[in-house]
Image (spheres, helix red, strand yellow):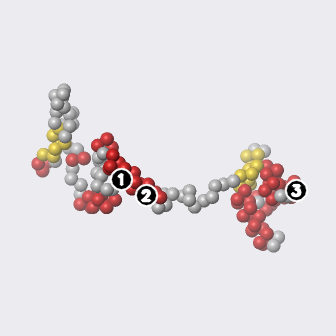
Amino acid sequence: MVCIPIGSALLCKHDTDRRSGITSPEAGQQHRRCLPPSEPARQLKQSTMIGIDDNMPIGAMNIGELRSLMAEILESSSHGVGSKTNNTAPRRYVYGIKGIEELFGCSHATAQHYKDNVISEAVTLNGRKIIVDANYAVELFGRRKNDGK
């Protein structure tokens, strides 16, 4: 089927399907894809989207247009737009008093003291389970050492 704008009314007329002779149910109706874009929208599309209309069906794109669109999207995402995973290190957790002992290389009593006082902000209790954000705990422990306590 082919959309053809008719005069200044911008109505669309569809060709009938040559095999069945059926006219589209949308025949004679106004369609967004046939309306001429406003000048600012046209300039924006030309500057950002490689000449692909926003109302173009994906099935109407050829392989070259799809490749260009995907390359543009990947390029814009690689510049850090909306990407926040590059800035943060992966979190590491230790579990229980035994995990604190292994993290700091200390005794059970000292690990209990650290859990209750020094690294209490990094500790999460879920029932009887002790979960410690290891990176944050080491940072808090370093602050304690720098404070001279």
- Which mark is nearer the camera, 3 or 1? 1
Label 2 close to label 1 by CB (< 8 Å): no
What label does residue 68 carry, if any?
1
Check the image and report above or below for 45 versus 13. below
Compare residues 5 and 129 and report the one nearer the observer.
Answer: 5
- Estimate the x, y position of residue 22 in percent, counting from the top left: 18, 29
**Which badge, 3 or 2, is on the more N-terminal residue?**
2
Q: Amino acid at mark 2?
A: Glu
- Which quarter of the rendering shows the C terminus? bottom right
- Residue at 69 percent of width and 53 percent of height: 92
The percent coordinates of residue 74 (x first, y second) are 44, 54
15, above or below 10, in the image? above
Residue 96 lies, in percent from the top left, at 79, 49
Badge 2: residue crowd in 10 Å (few <14, some 14–19, many ≥20): few
Question: What residue appears at the point 37 percent right and 50 percent down from the top-left corner?
Answer: 67
**Mark 3: which secondary structure?**
loop
Q: Secondary structure at mark 1?
A: helix
The span from disc 3 to disc 2 (Cα, nearest Å) is 51 Å
Choose mark 3 or mark 2, whichever is in front.
2
Q: Which residue is mark 2?
A: 75
